[in-house]
Image (spheres, coloured by chain):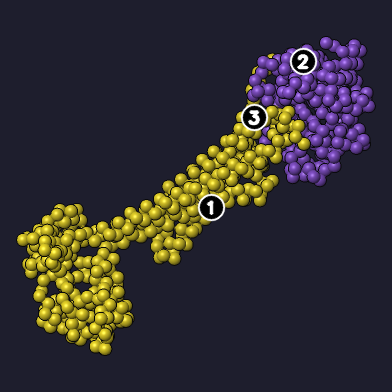
Amino acid sequence: MIELTDVHKTYAGGVRALDGAGIRIDAGELVGIVGPSGSGKSTLLHILGTLDRPTSGQVRIAGHDVGALDDAQLSALRASRIGFVFQQFHLAPGTTALDNVADGLLYSGRRRTERRELASKALTRVGLGHRLKHRTHELSGGEKQRVAIARAVAGGPALLLADEPTGALDSVSGAGVMELLGDLHRDGTTVVIITHDSDIARSLPRQVSIRDGRIVSDSSTLVGGRR
Amino acid sequence: MSTLAPRRLSTGDRLRVGAAGLHTRPMRVFLSSLGIAIGIAAMIAVVGISSSSRAELDAQLDALGTNLLSAQNGTTMMGEQAVLPLSAESMVGRIGPVTDVSAIGIVPDAKVYRSDKTPAAETKGIAAYAARTDLLETTATQLAHGTWLNNSTAQYPAVVLGAAAAERLGVSSPSPEIEILIGGRWFTVVGILEPSPLVPEIDTAALIGWPVAQEVLGFDGHATTLYARALPEQVESVQAVLGATANPEAPGEVDVAQPSDALEAQQAADQAFTALLLGIGAVALVVGGVGVANTMVISVLERRAEIGLRRSLGATRGQIRSQFLTESLMLSLLGGLAGVAIGGAVTVIYALTQDWAPVVPPWALGGGLGATLLVGCVAGLYPAARAARLSPTEALATP
């Protein structure tokens, strides 16, 4: 599903966010990528999600060589195969939960009625079937994140990328969100969770630690620091 | 491996996404489309009012006819007042395409006073003219009150006053009791004229019969101005021979004119003024466009997170560009529609107060909306390009 080989990312100004990171994630895995802030994990997520390109190195996502795709093709890849969940939810204010989720499918080429049907199903799946018509400001933090997750998975993406999904939530809501991500994984979605919280990472089947732009440990290989 | 191609948004989706950006900020939408509305309203109103005025003038010209020619006694080479021969009227009447001829002749030294108590200096610019009985018909002048001169009243001391003359003398309606003093003789006011659009010189005239002028005021019988109606398609050829026909011995001493020229000149002047006002309206529209561009730039800055999210959901740069362009077009189109409605309403109200038929040319409406779309497009290009250029990670990093 994901294959990164010797990926470097240097930002303008000389900041090295990734310095030879390599990782392989198979379809159907549930992986936590953990590291302190500034370790390069957000950059890694952006590259996994094709939102950014590496300075050097090879990235293969869902069978595509990202370096060989142009911007429009990457957009199409995101629209069809990748779902994102962000720490700040990024829901449209004043819009209903249903519309938020349905608009997430806007760029997938589906018709409006189909988008709304899928959105309704996805919301029911995350346990918000009774809140379809609620506007975002009427929802709690945990519910907002569930709406965001519903938006990410409504189109049935192969890969779900979550960036600190519990970062803005209290522990109870956070646990609920983690449970939901686990359910999605059991249903077959590849889930990658980025977090700085090692407790959360420990609860996942596979943990990858990142520090200073390098993978320093990976529980699946038990080998430190691939170069 | 499947090929990757971004899916196109349907037109409905594109409009819905564009509109979504608008209805979350209604006040800003109102104010920035107001600028466009003012510009368009100004332009539509200018075009509408001047079109209505021109239509009115055209109707007036149609009613009055542009085929009236006048031949006035000019000055001799010595600078003296020339005299038209007594035969001038019948000669002009014999020009083939001439259908009607009439004439007035100034009665020299016949001062006009309201009463014998009026000081001699107060002539009020009113002149006494002998008039042929077919003068009104030929010059398309309307009678306001009373009667016009006929073959019998033309023999007697009866006078018909031009509109301005009546006002200056303080005569509001004709009556057998109202007499005015012309050349020292009392004349009964039998009629008052409407203002004459084609022949304004008779507005300040006291018109009396040809015979009575000759008999009691010593009028020499020479016409001073001839009025001739020609067949419309031959007006120019008649105009060319009119001077020589009226006064064959001294054609250069005759001033020939086409009175409708004055109205047409007024129309041309109106058009020049309209062009100026239209220019001012265009400036207002451009200023409105700058307002829309400004609103859109701010909107792009404020909505970086939304742009980032949409990119992560799979929107291409083109789809982001088209979203903001659509929003800008809708914003200015909203203003344009309001402007067309306001401009149309102003035209109708103004035309009704002037007693005109309101005319708003369809090209002005279409042009107004077209200009709006153009302004919206130009105003949206830069902000939309900016939104599209934003890298997704940079956009998402904004809190």
Residue depicted at 28% across the width and 82% down the height: B174
Residue B48 locus on image (x, y percent)? 43, 55
Q: Which residue is mark 2?
A: A7
Pointers 2 and 1 in contact (CB under 8 A)? no
Asked whether the residues under marks 2 and 1 belong to the same chain, the reply is: no
Residue B359 falls in image quadrant:
bottom left
Nearest the viewer among B98 and B159 is B159
Name the chain letter of the residue that bears numbered label 2. A
Figure check: B114 above or below B1: below
Total numbered labels: 3
- Mark sitting earlier along the chain (3/1): 1
Residue depicted at 89% across the width and 34% down the height: A174
Q: Can residue A115 be spotted in the picture?
A: no
Residue depicted at 56% across the width and 40% down the height: B379
**In the image, what residue type sits under mark 1?**
Ile
Q: Colour of chain A?
A: purple
**Inter-mark Cα distance, 3 to 1:** 33 Å
Q: Colour of chain B?
A: yellow
**In the image, what residue type sits under mark 2?**
Val
